[in-house]
Amino acid sequence: MMASANVTESPGVSTPRLAKQGETPQASQARGVRVCPRPHSINLRSLDALRGILATYVVLHHARWLLWSGHSAWIQARHAVWANWIAYGSAIFRYGHDAVMVFFALSGFFIHLRTARKLAAGGDGRVDTVRFFQRRAHRLLAPYLFALLLTGVLDAVGRYFFPVLYAARTGDALLDHLFARKGYSLDSILPALCLVPAALGRDFGTNGPLWSLGYEVIYYLLYPCWCRIRLWNATVAFGVIPVFCLALTFTSGWGFPGAVLVDYPIWIAGAALAEWFCRRRVAPQSAMLAGLLLVGAFVLQHVVRSPLGVGLLNLLLGSAAVCCFALAPAAWAAHGWHRAWEFLGIRSYTIYIVHFPILVLISSWAMTAHGGLPKSGWLALGGAAIALALCLVAFEVCERHFLHERLRDSSP
């Protein structure tokens, strides 16, 4: 029986009565039953396209950093006007960390969507913990281990033939500082094997972006417990816990656990959006408001400097981006550009966890063979294209065999 009202069994949340089967909305209202409009259909395909946009953006962000000498070197030489505009325009790819924050909101949305639909349909919303972890392990573990293996192979090749960057001897203070904390010591290998890479302060090999996957794994571990709290009291789950986590920005000494918890409200905001979309009729025009909030959060990030303010803006940024694409018109899916981003979105997990050691290898080759990185951006563009192409090959080798049914049906 389909319920025509929003239902939840948790204390602290109002539980309206259900309409009788076959009863008209007018008759239900006459009996005092609150009838909610049909929820807006969530555009999951556009959310997959958002994944593709974010993954590609992160690749371009890292290619700009690793395969271009940088703006300060660029302005020391004369260039054509059009080339200057391209160099200045590349600054749009400076915000890789913000893209990861949107990924966190997307993750919370998709992970909680199944439970949110159960709650909206009148179910109890309980999570089968064993089944949940089985699904997560099946989806993520094999591609992750494949990425670790591939990182080790690429790093071994790079260290042998093009050692400059791997040995942190480039002469660039920032690069040398960052690559000095990458390698294969015990404090980098053990956390990576425990699915929390960089938890002890050292990246697994050169694959620095894996840090965010460690955050995600902890959010997955917390999810069944958080769901129990949600069923007990929604205010605590969606309000008290995020406020507590954001309050950690005023403290220090929490190390890795504190850093993980400070970003947890972004993940919870994604879960809150999943319930909101499943329970209420959201006007498509809300996408315009979400777009304005997205732009506003992006602009304010250049002004706000306090840790709490940055945390709140990250939460707003991730939530607004998810809203924009969840409310996208279904007609978008017919366009070639949308299908291209959706294609990359289905492969975004492999793209994200594999691309960086490929770019590092290309970068170290350029530094060893040519004494430094080029002042033009052609290597960055070409390197990004090579990295994306090799990531697609890696997807076919491994991740394709571990997709969930919805994504498998969408993957050609």
Image (cartoon, rainbow, N blue to C red):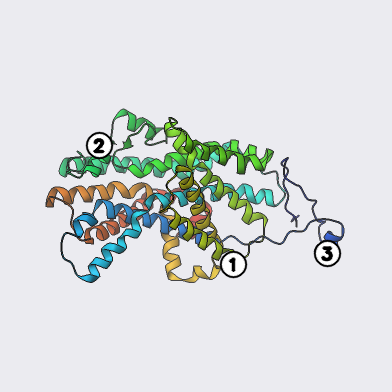
Residue bearing the label numbered 1:
285
Of circles 3 and 2, the one toward us is 2
Element at label 3: helix
Residue 291 placement (x, y as % from top left): 51, 62
Element at label 1: loop
Element at label 2: loop
Residue 410 placement (x, y as % from top left): 49, 60
Point 32% across, 42% down: residue: 207
Q: How many discs mark residues in the rendered view? A: 3
In which quarter of the view is residue 375 placed? bottom left
Cα distance, mark 3 to mark 1? 27 Å
Residue 198 left/right relative to 33: left
Residue 305 placement (x, y as % from top left): 42, 47
Residue kind at label 2, given as amino acid type: Ala
Point 12% across, 52% down: residue: 370
Residue 330 left/right relative to 187: right
Residue bearing the label numbered 2:
180
Is disc 2 in contact with disc 1, using a CB cutoff of under 8 Å?
Answer: no
Residue 283 placement (x, y as % from top left): 63, 65
Examine the rendering and report whether any part of residue 373 can be seen.
Answer: yes
Residue kind at label 1, given as amino acid type: Gln
Disc 1 residue crowd, few under 14, some 14–19, many 20+, Cα 10 Å: few
Locate the C terminus and report the quarter of the image it occupies. bottom left
- In front here: 154 or 308? 308
Cα distance, mark 2 to mark 1? 49 Å
Of circles 3 and 1, the one toward us is 1
Disc 3 residue crowd, few under 14, some 14–19, many 20+, Cα 10 Å: few
Residue bearing the label numbered 3:
26
Say whether disc 2 or disc 1 marks the residue closer to the N-terminus. 2
